[in-house]
Amino acid sequence: VESSLEGLMVIARATHERAPVLAVAHEVAALIEGALPAKGELTRRIDAAV
């Protein structure tokens, strides 16, 4: 799962129109974080990477 999110971050960095890719990445992160105790960490990592 983490490698999939990293892939989305690579695409977001390479894409001029980042908003749609980031929106998808945030949705995926929210779904994953719903099942994990460390809420918010994936979203922070996504935002920091782009």
Image: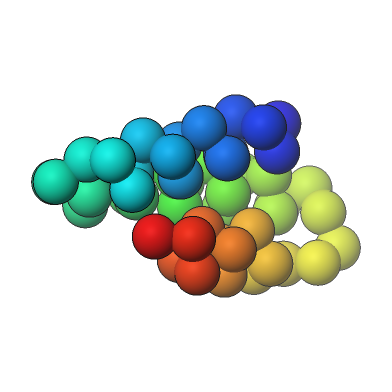
Above-or-below relation of 8 to 49: above
Left or right: residue 34 versus residue 35 is: left
Q: Nearer the viewer, residue 15 or 40?
A: 15
Task: Give the percent coordinates (x, y) of residue 16.
Answer: 14, 46
Image quarter where the C terminus lies is bottom left
- The residue at 81%/67% (across/down) is 38
* Residue 20 showing in the rendered view: no
Q: Quadrant of residue 36?
A: bottom right
Above-or-below relation of 2 to 43: above
Q: Quadrant of residue 11?
A: top left
**Which residue is the extreme one toward the right?**
37
Left or right: residue 44 versus residue 26 is: right
- The residue at 70%/52% (across/down) is 34
Task: Give the percent coordinates (x, y) of residue 17.
Answer: 13, 46
Above-or-below relation of 12 to 43: above
Task: Give the percent coordinates (x, y) of residue 23.
Answer: 33, 49
Image quarter where the N terminus lies is top right
Q: Nearer the viewer, residue 20 or 11?
A: 11
Colouring scheme, one of rainbow, by chain, secondary structure, one colour: rainbow
- The residue at 68%/44% (across/down) is 32
* Residue 11 showing in the rendered view: yes
Q: How many marks?
A: 0
- The residue at 45%/66% (across/down) is 47
Task: Give the percent coordinates (x, y) of residue 14.
Answer: 28, 40
